[in-house]
Amino acid sequence: MDISCFNLVVGVFMNKRTKSIFLFMLFAFFGNSQASIVTVNGTNVAFSYDDALLDLFGAPTVAGDQLFFTPTAFTAKAIGTAGFDFKNSTLNIKATALNGGTIDTVSLTERGDYISKGDSSYVEAGGQLRVTDLNAPLNEVTDAITLTAPVVKQSAFFPTQNWQAFADANVAGFGTSSVNITIENILVALSNAFGELGFIEKKGVVLGVSALPFDNITPVPLPASIWLFGTALFGLLGYSKRINFI
């Protein structure tokens, strides 16, 4: 083979190989930088989440067996004739009972403030709490996130009014140590006329998970036939030893 042709082939091979290695390293670097699973331990429960998928919730802090989120940009607003504004964000969190326990209940409390001034103005907060058994995914409980009191119209823009919403899920019947928690949040604001304002903001989300410790898990009683079988077995063993002794 001509030397120049050989050098050309080697050069092409090396270029392709170099490009492949470069692309692989680039993908690995950005993949790791964009997705990082964070696990924080509470008192009886460990929480795991992808910090690249927190969206409008923001990074949480843990206290006891609660995760506390303080959003800073979760807002829906409509001013004057702006019409309709809609903001939503969904978060997934894995909760695992520590020390061999099982997940008992999952509760959600949300808080914020709002302004609803004008006849056509309107604001609302809602969504859904969904808890799925990670050991048996067909086991699932959902509950709507609902306001504790309806929003009211205001005669002035200020002061803002406070709102609060709740949701909870009892999953003790699952008998599972690990669940996936999905929090779907929705804020809505509406304004159709000059001088009106619909504004609502989420400022706090508290996710609480309670777990039953291993010592509190109700044991499954053995049937009476097992005890009778055991008694008979010990009797036979004793009789066998007696015969061997004689």
Image (cartoon, rainbow, N blue to C red):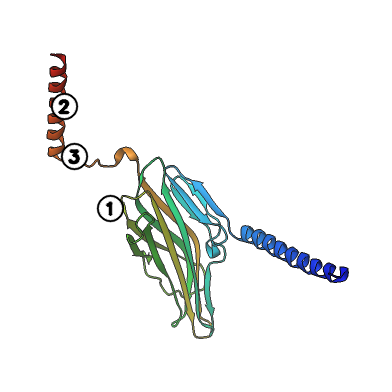
Residue underneath mark 3: 222
Q: Quadrant of residue 214?
A: top left
Residue at the extreme front = 1
State how far apart marks 2 and 1 are (Cα). Answer: 37 Å
Question: Of helix, strand and loop, which one carries label 3?
Answer: loop
Residue 214 versus residue 107 in the image, above or below: above
Name which residue lies at 12% across and 34% down. Answer: 228
The answer to which of 127 and 132 lies nearer the viewer is 132
Name which residue lies at 16% across and 25% down. Answer: 237
**Badge 3 or badge 2: first in the primary sequence:** 3
Question: Of helix, strand and loop, which one carries label 2?
Answer: helix
Amino acid tagged 2: Phe
Residue 221 versus residue 71 in the image, above or below: above
The answer to which of 35 and 172 lies nearer the viewer is 35
Question: Is the Cβ of the residue at disc 2 closer than 8 Å to that at disc 1?
Answer: no
**Badge 3 or badge 1: first in the primary sequence:** 1
Amino acid tagged 3: Leu
Quadrant housing the C terminus:
top left
Residue underneath mark 2: 234
- Image position, residue 211 (x, y; %): 36, 46
Question: Is the Cβ of the residue at disc 3 closer than 8 Å to that at disc 2?
Answer: no
Amino acid tagged 1: Gly
- In screen coordinates, is 31 left or right of 88? right
The answer to which of 110 and 137 lies nearer the viewer is 137
Question: Is the Cβ of the residue at disc 3 closer than 8 Å to that at disc 1?
Answer: no
Tell me, for residue 173, which label it has, or none.
Answer: 1
- Image position, residue 121 (x, y; %): 46, 79
